Amino acid sequence: MTEHYDALETREPASRERDQFAQLRRQLIHAIAHAPELAKRLAGIDPEAIDSREALAHLPVLRKSDLAALQKSKPPFGGLDARAGGGVRRIFASPGPIYEPEGPGPDHWRFARALFAAGFRPGELIHNCFAYHFTPAGSMLETGAHALGCAVFPGGTGQTEQQVMAIADLAPAGYVGTPSFLRIILDRADELGVALPSLGKALVSGEPFPPSLRDALAARGIHGYQAYATADVGVIAYETPARDGLVVDEGALVEIVRPGTGDPVAPGEVGEVVVTPLTNPVYPLIRFGTGDLSAELPGRSPCGRTNLRIRGWLGRADQATKVKGMFVHPGQIAAIVKRHPEVRRARLVVDNAGGSDRMILHVEAAGMDSALADAIVESIREVTKLRGEVTFRASDELPNDGKVIDDLRKLE
C-alpha cells in the first residue's frame, strides 16, 4: 500500500517552489482580472514578478478580521470572489458573519490528502460528525472523502445515542469531527454497553488535540490525526504517521509572519500563519492572514513528505488591547520597531501597577543606551498617542511564543 497520496508530496523542495509560484502567478492574473477588491489591493503589481517568497512578502496581507467589514460593504464576498460566469455550488456562513463560497471542483477545500495521511482509503465508509448546518465543516470533509473515493454517513453534531447506533450498525472505518465529540460518543457507547470495533482511525479538527486524548483513543484502537484548516482557505496542514509536526498542504503557500505585519519571521520563530491557496479560482484569497500563531519546523518529515512543516496551532495573533480608552495593535508595535534598526525584537507589556494602566516596551537591541531608549519612548508616543516606557532585554531573552502585546491586566 502506497504511503503517499501522490508524487507531489515527495518532490524536491526546489521543484515544488518553482511549480507553486507558477500556479501563484496564474492565480494572481485571474484574481486581478475577475475580483474587483483584489484588483484594487494588488494595483501596480506585476504578477510575473512574483516568483519567490521574497517577492510574495511584498504583497499586502488580507486579514480574517477584515473580511466581515468587506463583505458587509460589498455583499456577498466583499469583491474578493472571481466568479466569472458563476461557479459557486454552495455558500456557507461562519461567525461574524463571514460567508464562504464552495466552488464546483471535486475537492474544493483539499481534504482528500489529509484523510489519506490519516489512513483512510478508497472504498471505506467515514462517519462525519462535523456540522452540516450553516457552517462548511461537514461539506469540507464530505467533498474530500468523495474525492478520495470514500462513502460518507452525514452524522453532523448532537444526538449522541443515534450516533452510537449508526456506528454500530454501519461499521464505518473511521470518524471525522472534533476530538471532544468523538470522546463523548465513545463514552456514551460505554454507558449503553455497545461495542464500536470498526472505528480504527480518525481525522479531527476544530479544537486542540492534546496528546492525552490521542493516547486515550489509541488505547481503544483508534489512531487519531489532526488537520489544520479554515473555512476561508481549506486545509493548511495535516498530521502524518510520523507525528512530527503538521505537513503543509500541496495546494497552498504558507508563510509565518510577525503579527501585525507581512514580514516573514526567522525559521523557527513563532508568528502569524499567512496562507495563499493555489487551487481556488472562485475565491482566490492572496496572503490571507489567519490570525493563528505557529512556527516552522526544521528539516523534512520522517514520513517522506518534503513540504514545509509547522508546529500546529499555538494561539491567536490578534492581540489588540485597549489602554486608557485607546486600542493598541500589533501593527503599531511593528511600526515602532521599524523606526529603530537597532531593535531586533520587541514586546509591549501592559499592566496596571498602582491602579493605572502602564505600557512598557521590552526590546532586544544592539547599542542599548539612554539615547536609544529616549528615541523609542518618543516613537511610542507618536505611534500610539500614549505614554510608554522602555526596558532593554538580553539577546534571545524574550520568549519565542509569537506575543507582540502581553496584557497582564487580565491576570490581576
Image: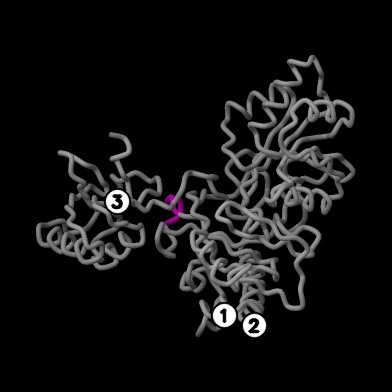
Q: What kind of residue is marked 2?
A: Ala
Query: For residue 267: magenta?
Result: yes
Task: Give the spatial CA distance, label 1 vs label 3.
Answer: 35 Å
The stretch of residues the image draws in magenta is 266-271
Q: Is residue 241 visible?
A: no
Residue position marked by numbered label 2 in the rendering: 33
**Of the image marks 1 and 2, the number of the one nearer the N terminus:** 2
Percent x, y for residue 206?
Answer: 61, 43
Secondary structure of the residue carrying numbered label 1: helix
The numbered mark at residue 39 is 1
Residues 319 and 400: in front is 319
Residue 300 relative to residue 192: left or right? left
Q: What kind of residue is marked 3?
A: Arg
Foreground disc of the pair 3, 2 = 2
**Neighbourhood count class around disc 1 (C-alpha, 10 Å): few under 14, some 14–19, many 20 upward:** some
User: Residue 336's image quarter?
Assistant: bottom left
Name the residue: 54% across, 63% down: 67
Name the residue: 49% across, 54% down: 291
